[in-house]
Image (tube, coloured by chain):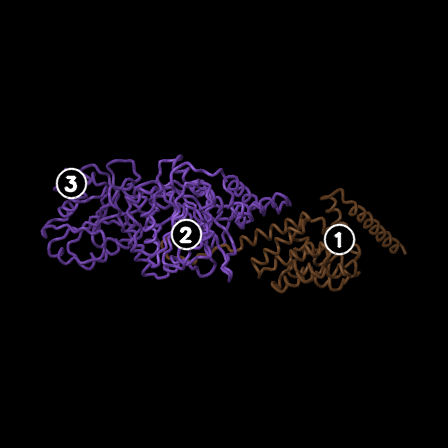
Chain colours: A brown, B purple
Amino acid sequence: MDITENNVDEQHDSTQHYEVLQELGDCYTSVGNYTQAQQCYEKAAVLSPDEAGPYVGLGVVALQKNLLDDAEIAFRVACRLDANCAKAYAGLAMVAQQRADYKQAFEMYLKSLELDTDNLIALLGLFQTSCQMGSFSKVIHYLEAYLNMHPGDTSVMFPLAALYMKDGKLEKSKKILLDLLTLDKSHTDAANLLEEVEHSLAQVKQGNQTGARV
Amino acid sequence: MGTPKKAGPVVTVLVPTFNRRRYLAGALASVVRQSYRNLQIIVINDGGEDVSDIVNSFGDERLIFINRKENRGKAHSLNEALARAEGKYVAYLDDDDLYYPNHIETLVDALENKSDCQVAYSDLYKVYCNVCPDGSRKVLSKVVEISRDFDRFFMLYWNHVLHVSLMHRRDLLEKTGPYNEDINVLIDWDMTRQLVFFSDFLHVPEITGEFYQPDGDCDRISVQRRKNEKEYTRNILTIRTTRPPKPWIKLGDMSIIFTTERLNKQAGTTLGSIWQRTFYPYEVYLPLPTADFEKLDTVMPNIIPVLVNPLSSQAERIDAALAICDGEYIAIVPSGFPIREFWVEDSLHALVNSSVNNEGFELEDSTERLWAVVVRKNDLQHARRSFPHLSVRESLNAAGIAIRHLQPEEIPFQFDQLLEKAKSAEKNGNWSKAAEMFEYITEHYQNELCMKTLAAKASFKAGGHIRAAELSREVNRQRPTVDTLLLEAKVKHEKKDFNSAIELLNKAEQILEGNELLWT
């Protein structure tokens, strides 16, 4: 112990006020109080001008208010401040998706997931955009990666099962749907899809048997 | 905030100022608007830019303004103001800091009604801020960094009481003497260190004000001066060797009897180390023959030479010193004895706190050749009177004074050592270890609120969010802080209890923004 040493440059936590405002902004956003949320994010941005977080928040608020240009500007500022900000790319993707620019949305969702495979919003956005574009090749990889990290996440299990089915991977689809229904018996979409998958499996089986007889 | 109180003793608040016009108005407003009204407020301009317009703008008859043109330092300013002080109690405020409205009321209530202490102190937020080009301060964080229950032994070693949070009886200054104008940093510790000789301190663990720490290069004169290492060390040594006039009501003096055949280089080195490393108040008694006595030429303070016969034995020399020693505790130390940090205080702490009579402690680095001991003076006197023909060691033994070694649990500053280890774990990113240690300290030592806050922060970073929320909630129930409100809110947010999180975060934001309601 040497507390007499002349330590006048002690490190300290300089982000506390920023954190309070950022948290407060996020909570206000979650309860739909966008005016208060915006005020918090603006104050946070003044306090920590190099942080991307407040601009992501401002982008989300603008998106909720359907101010797509404002949202895009905010998300772009966030990307400029932090080139690895997955949330900012997801935000840009959502803006593009709202504008029906699915190609751009798809790219931005992909970029976001490259930075953070754990981003559920980007994942589901990617899935939706894929559906809108009719192209699923890259989605399955990210859904699988996410499900590996969050094995019980039913919101991802269903789209993955649907994609497996679309790809003809019926057994894989059935397994996931059975797991999903174990976790959530009331998931009617899953139950319906399972019925469909089992029907397809039966047809395949029947086809195989017929082929064998011929 | 309670109803304004007019009754009660006068409290003199001293506000020294030097070239901080920008913040002085805020500081003074925080005093003038105290809920406790019976104040004498003395503002002392220490030769800085004119602030009379700011002081006069309050139009408050409780304000006295000393507008000195010459810069003579903070210690001089405080002494000048104290000469005009009339209050039963004295409190302090720097020109860039703030009291919360209940500050004076809280401390007066504590001193008048809650203890026999003549000194009380509360907790303060340390406010880290950015200073904008226009001089305004942008608050980055408000943290209670120092919240420590009174520890006399520690206060002799280092300060743990912030001056802005301090209130003491004015008449204690008749015992301590005025502020020491020969030192230019840590003048607050110099005073609080002297106050511990005469009173216990009462810790009121409420946050009653804030002091500011600008980010980057701090403009505080005291911080700037600390950067001059040589000067800083001189100040520390001056403070540690200052001995207020006796009688000391709360502290026993220590006399060090230094034994050496001759006043040679080795003796000089050992004496120098004693000067450098001893923080408990002491005087060194130096039994020397005439030849050495005449050679003695040192700037080391608190040395008392004792003239002895050159042919006298070591025991006779010790007896000669003992005859005039003034301390309640006697340390006998030979020349060449290794003087490390806490060399005598470890054992002295055990002796001071021992309820057993007739015992003393052999110092930790003591050997057969370099035997060193600390004992009560009356025990040593009894031993020497009873067995003058024996060596000191033998006489103590013969008189039934048990000389033993220190037990691990008797070592002082265990709290500080554990705290340092916990902070080191924190620094290394070992958050779960740090959290565990902070919780252990909370259970086994004092300073509960502060330790619980540290435990909560470390638990959160270690991923123990539920435990972090529990600890934060416990602190928030007693004394909410920004840190603990934020932690509890984060966990509420995770659980999607957004409204509760918002409530907690708004409280934190109010504290950070220094809600105007505080001042009205």
Q: Position of residue A135 (x, y in %)?
A: 78, 61
Which residue type does callout 3 highlight?
Answer: Arg
B121 and B468: which one is in front?
B121
Q: CA distance from mark 1 to mark 3?
A: 93 Å
Q: Chain of mark 2?
A: B
Residue that sits furthest to the top in the current view: B113
B11 and A178: which one is in front?
B11
Q: Chain of mark 1?
A: A
Left or right: residue B417 versus residue B302 is right
The residue under the point 15% across, 54% down is B261
Say what secondary structure mark 1 lies in. Answer: helix
List the residue tagged with mark 2: B94
List the residue tagged with mark 1: A159
Say which of marks 1 and 3 sits in front: 3
Q: Residues within 10 Å of mark 2 (few under 14, many from 20)?
A: many
Residue B238, by quadrant, is bottom left
